[in-house]
Amino acid sequence: MEKVLAGQEWFWEKLNHYLAKSQLKHSKQRNFIIEEFLAMDSHVSAEELYSQLKNRDHNPGLATVYRTLNLLKDAGLVDQKQFSDGKSVFEVMAPDSHHDHLICLSCHKVIEFENEEIERLQELVAKKHSFKLTKHSLELFGHCSDCVKTL
Ligand SMILES: [Zn+2]
Ligand SMILES: [Zn+2]
């Protein structure tokens, strides 16, 4: 049985549902990879997850890590984002929680923010174009407060 952290019940429930629907079996290895992923900070790359697993004496292979993250993506549980330099990160899509990102081009720090007015304006723009909005992703690039001092 997987180790379920508080507040992550919805994640495993949705995953179980997806696996059943897709007629996929649970695998111990996959569960371990997912547990480690959930225990990490948000915005994790496949490579970071892979080295974290290695530190924990698990060596599933990078291809398996990718396959697992892609499965979570197909299940609608994680979002894949391209933040900078072709580095692709994954983050959990918690229900009813939405945020956008400020990305530092110097130190690659990612700051999350929520702004109701931006959200509202985006809906307004879509409406003006009779565009049915299903999701959005907003990334602002620049230099964080630490890095801007050394520019
Ligand atoms: Zn920075
Ligand atoms: Zn985020």
Image (tube, rainbow, N blue to C red):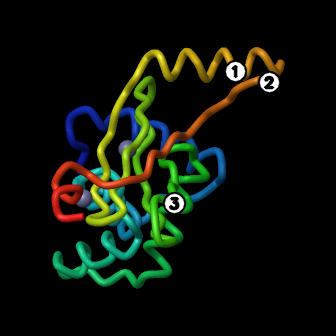
What's the distance in space between the residues labelled 2 and 1, CA to CA? 8 Å
Q: Quadrant of ligand 1?
A: bottom left
- Name the residue: 55% across, 62% down: 70
Residue 12 in view in this figure: no
Circle 2 sits on which residue? 131
Q: Position of residue 11 (x, y in %)?
A: 40, 40
What's the distance in space between the residues labelled 3 and 1, CA to CA? 24 Å
| Tag 2–tag 1 contact (CB < 8 Å) | yes
Please state which of the two labelled residues, at mark 2 or mark 1, is closer to the viewer.
1
Circle 3 sits on which residue? 82
Describe the element under mark 2 as helix, strand or loop: loop
Q: Earlier in the sequence, mark 2 or mark 1?
A: 1
Q: Residues within 10 Å of mark 1 (few under 14, many from 20)?
A: few
48 up-or-down from 126: above or below: below
Numbered-mark total = 3
Q: Residues within 10 Å of mark 3 (few under 14, many from 20)?
A: few
Residue 20 in view in this figure: yes
Amino acid type at circle 3 is: Gln
| Closer to the camera in the image, 15 or 97 | 97
Circle 1 sits on which residue? 125
Describe the element under mark 1 as helix, strand or loop: helix
Residue 62 numbered tag: none
- Name the residue: 39% across, 33% down: 10
Describe the element under mark 3 as helix, strand or loop: strand
